[in-house]
Amino acid sequence: MNGREQWSGRLGFILATLGSAVGLGNIWRFSYVAGENGGGAFLLVYIGAVLAVGLPLLLAELAMGRAAQGDVTRAFAHPAPRNPLRHVGLLAVAGSILILSYYSVIAGWTLRYLATYAGDLAAGRPAADAAADFAGFIADPLAPLAWHVAFMLLTILVTAGGIRRGIESANRVIMPLLGLTVIGLAAYALSLPGAGAGVAFLLMPDWSALGEPRVYLAALGQAFFSLGLAMGVLATYGGYLARGHRLPGAAVAITFGDVLFALVAGLAIFPAVFAFGMAPEQGPALAFVVLPEVFARMPAGVLFGFAFFALLALAALTSAISLLEVAVAWAMGLGLRRRTAVAGVGTLVLLLGIPSALSFGVLADVTLDGRGLLDAIDHMVSDYLLPIAGFGIAVIAGWLWRRDEALAEVELGPRLGRLWRLAVRYLAPAVIALILLRSLGLA
Ligand code: TRP
């Protein structure tokens, strides 16, 4: 022991890691990406991507982190300390900061909606006209920025508490609450007349979508984002896990839990959307315009809205904590105290988030590739940054890590171990490369 912080045990580690995985990606992002990419057909491709590429890489990241017992730069340098590919660790530190900067802006929106619904609930008012409300809010020069700051302060507060007393304790309370809330919301949505069309949309494949390359790109990007792969979160959290806790079961629980959560959230969202005759394909505004309109029409809609945005905000918080911890652990590895590291990195994220926070208001005219700033950054992250870093991690774990050491660290028997290595060595790099080339227009 070198005095580094550690999880209290395997359960605390699993809850915290699941908390990182389950976030806006499962609710806000999954629902509109599935909507844009063919519903049921997307789901099929998505589950394939998670099992074939996501799970093996998740296990690889966790194993490298635990083997190194250090931050992400140590984890990715562990298999081959002198190979230049180790710098993927620094890419992950920078990338996690970038992701958090816009993630926190969306999370700030959820806080604002939570506050509005709480007010409506207390005053016994019906919800206001949703589309106008949303348009007015995100175009405001100040409000989105203020809520981004509020959300980051919450994130900073928890992370400053440290691994056990901050991060683990928060997840021990929030994760069971999230499970109960999403199940309750799905049960209510499924009981609405006309809910069946929403279930069919989510579960019935439209085979023609399988011929479209963009569906595969979207599925892989969503798998990486939702599992929280490639940005060192898993390596960082694995680095706080003592040896002797078995990894494969934990990896399966985290992966399975993350997919299940997105599915149940989908069973809360789409039945409600269809029951009120709305269309599911509305892009990122799905959660903030379509759903509030649904809530405005549904019995007990204000209560539903309050519960839904509480769910979103808390899920986002446990993910944001993990993104912040990547850079915090790295800074602590350079010798900073936790408080100093959290304050420094937190302030950086606060500032970096300003353009995203203003991207629908003051900066609405600034576009990249025809997209607003926040959308453009999100696409850049999921289409390029995550796959590129994921490719690097696959090569490090599959090609640079000595076979016997890697197999001992991932703790799979000889048969599953061989399968894991095939996935990390060949399948993951091949699939990622193919999809990257396509999205660059080269294949
Ligand atoms: N997985 C989280 C979500 O679904 C977000 C997240 C956490 C993330 N860590 C990440 C996304 C690392 C990309 C990379 O909302």
Image (cartoon, rainbow, N blue to C red):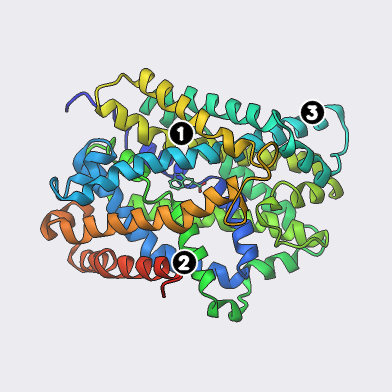
Can residue 176 be seen?
no
The mark that comes first in sequence, 2 or 3, is 3
The mark that comes first in sequence, 3 or 1, is 3
Q: Position of residue 158 (x, y in %)?
A: 47, 25
Q: Please give the residue where the numbered disc 2 appears in the rendered image.
A: 439
**Quadrant where the image shows the C terminus:** bottom left
Report which quarter residue 437 is drawn in.
bottom left
Q: Please give the residue where the numbered disc 3 appears in the rendered image.
A: 119
Residue 164 - label: none
Tell me the kind of residue under disc 3: Gly
Mark 3 secondary-structure assignment: helix
Q: Position of residue 339 (x, y in %)?
A: 38, 18
Report which quarter residue 326 is drawn in.
top left
Tell me the kind of residue under disc 2: Ser
The mark that comes first in sequence, 1 or 2, is 1
Residue drawn at (76%, 63%), measured in percent from left and top?
279
Q: CA distance from mark 1 to mark 2?
A: 30 Å
Mark 1 secondary-structure assignment: helix
Q: Position of residue 317 (x, y in %)?
A: 53, 35
Label 3: how many Cα within 10 Å (few below 14, some 14–19, many 20+): some
Label 2: how many Cα within 10 Å (few below 14, some 14–19, many 20+): some
Residue drawn at (22%, 56%), measured in percent from left and top?
397
Q: Is residue 118 above or below residue 340?
A: below
Q: Please give the residue where the numbered disc 1 appears in the rendered image.
A: 321
Given this view, does label 2 or label 3 mark the residue nearer the observer? Answer: 2
Tell me the kind of residue under disc 1: Ile
* Number of numbered discs on residues: 3
Q: CA distance from mark 2 to mark 3?
A: 44 Å
Residue drawn at (61%, 53%), measured in percent from left and top?
371
Q: Position of residue 86 (x, y in %)?
A: 22, 47
Q: Looking at the image, do the residues carrying marks 2 and 3 touch, with CB atoms under 8 Å apart?
A: no
Label 1: how many Cα within 10 Å (few below 14, some 14–19, many 20+): many
